[in-house]
Image (cartoon, rainbow, N blue to C red):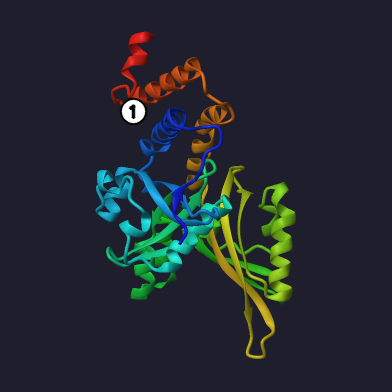
Amino acid sequence: MSKEKPEARELCTGEQASVLDEALLMGLRASVFSNTGMPCCIFERVCDDAGKVRDLRVLDVNPAYSSLFQLPASQARGSLITQVFPKAEQTEFRLLFEAAERGTPYSYGSFFAERGRHLQVSLFCPRPGYLVALLLDVSESVLLVRRGQGAEALQRMAGRVARLGGWFVDLETMVCEWSEEVAAIHAMPLAYSPKVEEGIRFYAPEWRERITQVFEACARDGEPYDEEMQIINAHGERLWIRTIGQALRDAEGRIVGVQGAFQDISEQQRYREEFERHLEELRRWQGLSIDDAERRQALKREVNALCARLGEPPRYASVEKDG
């Protein structure tokens, strides 16, 4: 049986790894935990001897995460995700583990049965060996659908909660019908229904070729897509969006339309970028072998500075005395 172990870190052992981990956690907390009401959790990969991700260890959670899951941060820290949520579906763990292995951003929908909450989960890796989860509660929107309160009520609620809407393209007319929220994201009138080529022009120039490729493959071959791209709305604002498309077939199996979902994910992307901006400074330490006392002292001072930003006492009092 293979032994599970945390991700190995090159160039960093003993006190070096400890100080780097301290800097990473403090940096993440300073950059995002104290600035967002979205539930957020940081994980460390736990791998077997072959390097396969077998679990995730919780390094920290913010107050919104603790509140959502009724899970005190002190209880969560250091626990394995499979222990924290023993009743979760294996599919959920598989999605998390695969995202941690790939290291690329990924989003999916989830249902937390114990609290009856529908969540959109956004995952990304701020550096190798770590995974960050940002959660968006979309339960109110789902509840409206189940109660049959109509598309209008759904779109109003979706606009407030998730910035989420739907769209449909009739392949005979090549006209795209937008829901109210999709029109609002584009800063266009609520009843606006553009031709496909006009809709594509809203995408930022560097994304137009990609959206054209995936849409045409879906319309021609029935190949679904799920992409994160940028648009420029009618107000000139650049927005990160997630667009999902799937083919609609008639009784004979012919593709007659393409339909899907469209969501403004700019807020989630902003948090990702905040992580990256702050961690860029920390990454310079990752590329150095901090085997001398002067470099270790400098990194400890950086940790103490992050503590000050969070209103906490310094972690390395001896450094302050020496300085």
- The local secondary structure at tag 1 comes to loop
Answer whether residue 265 is visible to the viewer in this image.
Answer: yes
Q: Amino acid at mark 1?
A: Leu
The residue depicted at 64 percent of the width and 86 percent of the height is: 250
Q: In this image, 45 relative to 193: left or right?
A: left
Question: To which quarter of the image does residue 283 belong?
Answer: top right
Which percent across, then down, holds residue 302? 43, 22
Q: According to the image, label 1 marks what residue?
A: 310
In the displayed structure, would residue 190 be above or below residue 267? below
Question: To which quarter of the image does residue 116 belong?
Answer: bottom left
Which percent across, then down, holds residue 305? 39, 21
In depth, the one of 15 and 215 nearer the eye is 15
Category of crowding for the residue at label 1, using alpha-carbon neighbours closer than 10 angstroms: few (below 14), some (14–19), many (at least 20): some
Question: To which quarter of the image does residue 159 belong?
Answer: bottom left
Of all residues, the one furthest to the bottom in this rendering is: 252
Which percent across, then down, holds residue 34? 35, 36
Figure quadrant of the N terminus: bottom left
Answer whether residue 38 is visible to the viewer in this image.
Answer: no
Which percent across, then down, holds residue 196? 69, 64
